[in-house]
Image: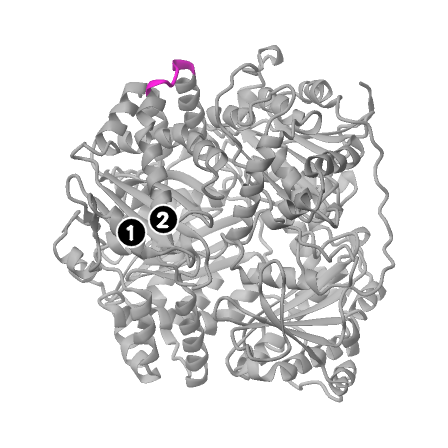
Amino acid sequence: MAITFSSDNLVVKAPTDRRLYRVIHLSNGLCAVLVQDPEIYPDGPPDPSNALENGHEQEDSEDEEEGFEDEDDDEEDEDEDDEENEEDEEEGLDDDEEDDEEVETDAKKSAAAAMCVGMGSFSDPADAQGLSHFLEHMLFMGSTEFPDENEYDSYLSKHGGSSNAYTEPEHTCYYFDVKREFLKGALKRFSQFFISPLVKVEAMEREVLAVDSEFNQILQSDSCRLQQLQCHTSAPRHPFNGFFWGNRKSLVDAMERGVDLREQILRIYRENYHGGVMKLVVIGGEPLDTLQDWVLELFSNVKDGQPIKTKIHKEAPIWKSNSLYRLEAVKDIHSLDLTWTMPCLHKEYLRKPQDYLAHLLGHEGKGSLLYFLKAKGLATSLSAGVGDDGMQLSSIAYIFSMTIYLTAAGIEKIYEVIGFVYQYLKLLRQDEPQEWVFRELQDIGNMEFKFAEEEPQDDYAVELAANMLLYPEEHIIYGDYAYEIWDEKLIKHVLSFLKPENMRVDVMTKIIDKQSKDIQYEPWFGSQYIEEAIPMSLLELWRDPPEVEPSFHLPLKNEFMPCDFTIRSVNSPNHPTHSCLPKCIIDQPMMKLWHKLDKTFKVPRANTYFLITVKGAYNDVRSCVLTELFINLLKDELNEILYQAGVAKLESALSIIGDKLELKIYGFNDKLPILLSKILATTNSFLPADDRFKVIKEDMERAFRNTNMKPLNHSTYLRLQLLREDFYDVDDKLVCLTNLSLSDLKMFVSGLLSQMHIEGLCHGNLSKEEVLAISDILRSKLSNSLLPMELRHKDRVVCLPSGADLVRDIHVKNKLEVNSVVQVYYQIEQDFGVESTKWRSLGDLFSDIVEEPIFNQLRTKEQLGYVVECGPRLTYRVLGFCFCVQSSKFGPLHLHARINNFISGLKELLDGLDGESFENHKSGLIAKKLEKYPSLNYETSHLWGQIVDKRYLFDMSEKEAEELKGIHKSDIIDWYNTYLRPNSPKCRRLAIRIWGCETDMQARETSLEHVFSIEDLEAFKMSATFYSSLC
């Protein structure tokens, strides 16, 4: 097949980007971007004739594609972050060493690819809702050339790779990453998705259940419920008016109505999966000519097609303009969503008028809408703009949204709040668009583009492929950052769409009149809502408010905009296989400070992380709640400063971990010391006011009530609650918080910051002298009184007794939650001593071997549920291993039995693992361990994890990779026999079972014969023994 176009100089890239890019067009219409990354093969590319394909390896397994990536993973319960850090034993640097220690890491990158097909859920037939999403699932289930359903994922799993996919309204994206040597073999299997998928009937019958299980994961998600209500209430026959997730009912009902589902899938595949709408990205270390040869060889048989011209949609309005929809929320929240429809602005990406408006409407500084609403006690947060998901960013329309989280007072004054929104909009109309605001956004975009941080290879491939559908080919990298053309008229034009007659109003709250005769039900989620008419008098008032709130004004120029982009390590060799370990440059009773000057990424960014241990923050439930309350009030006080810095890409995070305040400041390093000084000065002098105390307290009460609403999070919470010696239950915290007063807080805070200890890490574009200056800021702004070691909280973990087989059963917190969860946890050993590196390595290798078979058996074959996973756990330096299944179809007893059955069968699986497969798993895992960090942030996270858990083994991954080289299959079998076989004295397991609303917990009585059920948690801990505290 011929190439109709090729260019190596088309794509605009940052001056620091060393990758080579080539754009090619195949005669079948397919467009591909080939990326040669020199860091994949830092010593030079291999001979292309030696590419490893392993084309005939086949094992029983299936894909890990998530499809239709839902929003259920974005909210973690508060105690989860304390646990899952990958860290190691206390083998750090000698503090008195003068020079940085260099370590040979042999760091390499993986290869990756992504394919975006310009067809998505808007193409669903009306009589088979969710079919495009179902098609995405089915492409993973075998092809003519590779008929085994799991061949693709099995190949990736054995070669250090992974895969995923998602379906948007107007495109579907498939992607993978893999160990560098196996890129061609992965592409060979991947290409068949787009040439000859089998779509077997028997696979369809099972995969319908997977789609249904996936839908049930988000059934109780407020954001998904709101999106579906907006679809349900959109104009009939409008592309928005659909059910894009799909579930068993939408697909099986179609079959029962006589729809041939397989024929429908094949029809939309034939009509839409052709070269004219396919955008492929391949990232490898091979020369561009080699990557081009592979693409020609493997993708030339994709069906011919022509690019689809963008349709100009001149349709009726999407929604009614005079209605307010009051949707019953699952969580205890009060949110107001205002939505305006705009024309598609794809072609205006060099002007970005919507970003100009979002910047002003979403601003949080003095004079802003949010600043005013917070001062009035009506709102706690606000966001505005056009989202980056396919519903808001389509060729049909841009959807500009404003989400305001309201207080209890605010939910009673919805129309008043909307009135203030239109007063601010009137201000924007009265004041001509300001060019300096646009230039500030332009400066931020330019510095972000010039010094962009790399991301994981598969994420980058997806980003480029999706951008090929959005931007001209030369701007697939630059397009997101571009603010090139100041266009005042266009801003005014776009602003003209933000008017009452073009506005949709949604309110999510638990305050809804369920006895109302106007109650309606959204059919797919079963959500209850009421549609209310907005009085015409209000719409007229909002159209042209008689006055503008006097405190409203445009933001001031940003004092945190960086000016100095000098690279501190400019004279250091840029060699990815050498990295300096952090150096402890201050080691005093009061402060311990680690420093690592970045010599790898060479960007003007730095990450400064601090743990500030304070007095009595975790002594009891009252002190725990008071500390959280203080931190939340402090963040509220700092919000204007932190927001301004964040706009200038100098981010911050302040949280509490036990008795430690964790402060992170990261981003462009020029103004970092200024921000640190302002944060600490406020911390030292801050006294909360009564009005903010009431608002933040109310917000915390709501957050406590919303904790554990998701069964997966709940199961992890319960495991940690049982394993940790000191763990304050969220219900107890809520009771305590309700009774606290402002005077209680003021009295407590005076002692909280009176004594402390500081440990920190400064990593990135900061010299030793600059880090020492930062230490001076810490000393000058914080207490100089040392917190004695004996007053610092020590986390201890229960040491489960020999042969323990424990069970804890709990109902779901949300009484409408249909999902059940079983999490089976095996405790291994304390992560300490000479054997710890081997224990960690064995656990990781075992996980790598077992991850795909458990998914294939329990999800693909048995269809237990959408979430089926396993992996190592680290709980305050205690190693464990976990198996977890979430299901809306089966109850905990069945799930527990099937997990146990799978674990019992692992002996046979391990015995039958051939030598070549074992070595593939091992070499793939070694490659993962040695893979170069994508960016400074990823490396900082690893280094900081070592400090938080006081291991200081900064080259942990390299040590584990070296340990793996000497591990044999017999070692894995011995590890399994020692820790997971039930008759072994060292087999100690704990099952957490969350019972869904449709299950009967009384049935558990028949399952308790051979296990110990923990009914009284306090009594269990009173009789338990504990590991010594290491962190």
Q: Residues within 10 Å of mark 1 (few under 14, many from 20)?
A: few
* 3D distance between C-alphas at marks 2 and 1: 9 Å
Q: Badges 2 and 1: C-beta atoms under 8 Å apart?
A: yes
Above or below residue 842? Residue 407 is below
Q: Residues within 10 Å of mark 2 (few under 14, many from 20)?
A: many
Picture residue at 18% right of the left edge, 43% below the top: 804
Q: Amino acid at mark 1?
A: Arg
Where is residue 118? Give x, y as percent: 75, 41
Q: Is residue 375 left or right of 466 when viewed as pictured?
A: left
Instruction: Answer whether residue 466 is magenta in the image.
Output: no
Q: Is residue 120 left or right of 567 when viewed as pictured?
A: right
Name the residue that disc number 2 marks. Answer: 892
Compare residues 253 and 64 and report the one nearer the observer. Answer: 253
Label disc, if present, on residue 1004 of the rendered structure: 1
Where is residue 867? Give x, y as percent: 46, 44
Q: Amino acid at mark 2?
A: Pro
Which residue range is magenta in the image? 911-916
Q: Is residue 51 left or right of 898 when viewed as pictured?
A: right
